[in-house]
Amino acid sequence: MSYSSKSPWLIHYDGSSCNGCDIEVLDSMMPLYDVERFGIINTGNPKHADIFLITGAINHQNVNVVKHIYEQMLEPKVVVACGICACTGGVFKEAYNVIGGADKAIPVDVYAPGCAVRPETIIDAVLKAVKILDEKAAKMGASEKNR
């Protein structure tokens, strides 16, 4: 088990957002908000990521991509839905091609609503995700000891 709560890695995927939430995600990584002060590192490789941060609604074109990224991530892993579109489908949920929020494709652990979601909300959600990762890692460790 390679997960460490001191340096969780995050992968960000834009489902089909207006880019408002993506700008806020990037803002949360910049010096003003600096999510990296908590040891969080942004990666582009799902096999290295502990936290899957997704923005935008899930539609018929990206549902398989979202599932594929999630399946490539090693356990323990946590999903954070950022923005109202990732949480519920948002203003696009009645569109013909939109399935809904991220939880229509993969299990979501933390919801960070907002349109666009604020960097402070994103950081709070990521820190909640780190706590959930710790819990999942502890459960995995306990189940491995019981074998």
Image: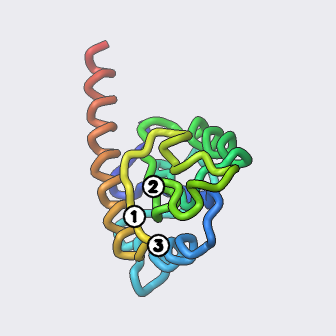
Q: Nearer the viewer, residue 142 or 54?
A: 54
Q: CA distance from mark 3 to mark 2?
A: 11 Å
What numbered label is drawn on residue 72? none
Q: Helix, strand, or loop for circle 2?
A: helix
Q: Nearer the viewer, residue 23 or 1?
A: 23
Query: How busy is the neighbourhood of tag 2: few (under 14 within 10 Å), some, or many (20 plus)?
Result: many
Label located before the other in sequence (2 or 1): 2
Residue 131, position in %: x, y? Answer: 28, 51
**Amino acid type at mark 3:** Cys
Instruction: Determine the residue located farthest toward the right in the rendered image.
Output: 61
Q: Nearer the viewer, residue 76 or 58?
A: 58
Instruction: Determine the residue located farthest toward the bottom in the rendered image.
Output: 32
Residue 14, position in %: x, y? Answer: 62, 61
**Amino acid type at mark 2:** Cys
> Which of the colour schemes (rainbow, by chain, secondary structure, one colour) is used?
rainbow
Pointers 3 and 1 in contact (CB under 8 A)? yes
Query: How busy is the neighbourhood of tag 3: few (under 14 within 10 Å), some, or many (20 plus)?
Result: some
According to the image, label 3 marks what residue? 115
Query: Where is residue 133, by image quadrant?
Result: top left
Left or right: 94 with respect to 84?
right
Q: Is residue 43 visible?
A: no
What numbered label is drawn on residue 87? 2
**Vertical position of residue 32 compared to residue 47: above or below:** below
